[in-house]
Amino acid sequence: MKKLKGFLFVLCTTLSMGVLTACSNTDTDTYKNYVQGVLDTNFKGVYDDYMKLTNAAETEAAEIYESNITAITDDFLSSGLITDPTEEERERLRQFAIALLNKADYKVKDVEKKDEAYYVNVEIRPYIFYSTLQDKLLTKYSELSEKYLDTDIDSMSNEEYAGYVSEYNEATFALMDEVLNLNEYGEPITVACKIIVTKDYYEINSSDYETIYSTLYVPID
């Protein structure tokens, strides 16, 4: 049975920020570089600092970045925003995911010591993307649903159905690109990342880098 494309959606991408531990020390500049490396690996696909501090191989760092690209593309596919994509559309979606990750706007600032713990402050400009896209897609999908209101989707030939799906997919891609180009950001927010230090290693507190992600991309209300 052919599926009618939906026009209500919730994107709830949760990137699983990859983090490897680094050898322990109390060099605050190293902590800053480590946080910078974690963020750059996850969002920019830049691995040098991360590899240097964690002794990770490039393949390990690349897997972290690729997993985030996959998370975004899977989200758009599972939400029904992109349906039955061609190989060309899959590559287009991948390039969109890379562009969306690259929109992450963060600056690693100073390091503070509080109660014997170290915190790296990260200034973030929240990227307003999902809610804007949702508003635009609701309008566009409503227009398209009116066009196909009296159409029996199941009676379409394979060629007709492919054209129907392509029309919706193209509308989605066009609006995704439009919203990306708007570059809408909120006011800067500072997130303090606690560095968990043990005798042998250090790492970012897991709840803090989850906070970073949820701050970088403003979720849908």
Image (cartoon, rainbow, N blue to C red):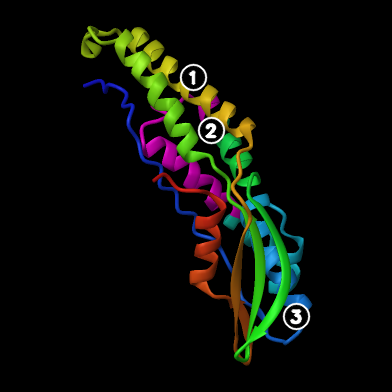
How far, Cα to Cα, is label 1 from label 2?
11 Å
Name the residue carrying label 2: 93
Q: Position of residue 33 (x, y in %)?
A: 75, 70
Q: In which quadrant is the N terminus drawn?
A: top left
Q: Earlier in the sequence, mark 1 or mark 2?
A: 2
* Dominant secondary-structure state across the stretch colored magenta: helix
Residue 56 shows in this picture: no
Residue at figure coordinates x 38%, y 26% from the top left: 138
Of helix, strand and loop, which one carries label 2? Answer: helix
Q: Position of residue 137 (x, y in %)?
A: 43, 26
Numbered label attached to residue 28: 3
* Foreground: disc 1 or disc 3: 3
Q: Earlier in the sequence, mark 1 or mark 3?
A: 3
Q: Is residue 53 located in the magenta-colored stretch of the structure?
A: no
Name which quarter of the figure residue 76 lies in. top left
Residue at figure coordinates x 64%, y 37% from the top left: 183
Dots 1 and 3: beta carbons under 8 Å?
A: no
**Magenta region:** 65-90
Name which quarter of the figure residue 209 lies in. bottom right
Residue 5 shows in this picture: yes
Q: What amino acid type is highlighted by mark number 3?
A: Thr
Name the residue carrying label 1: 170
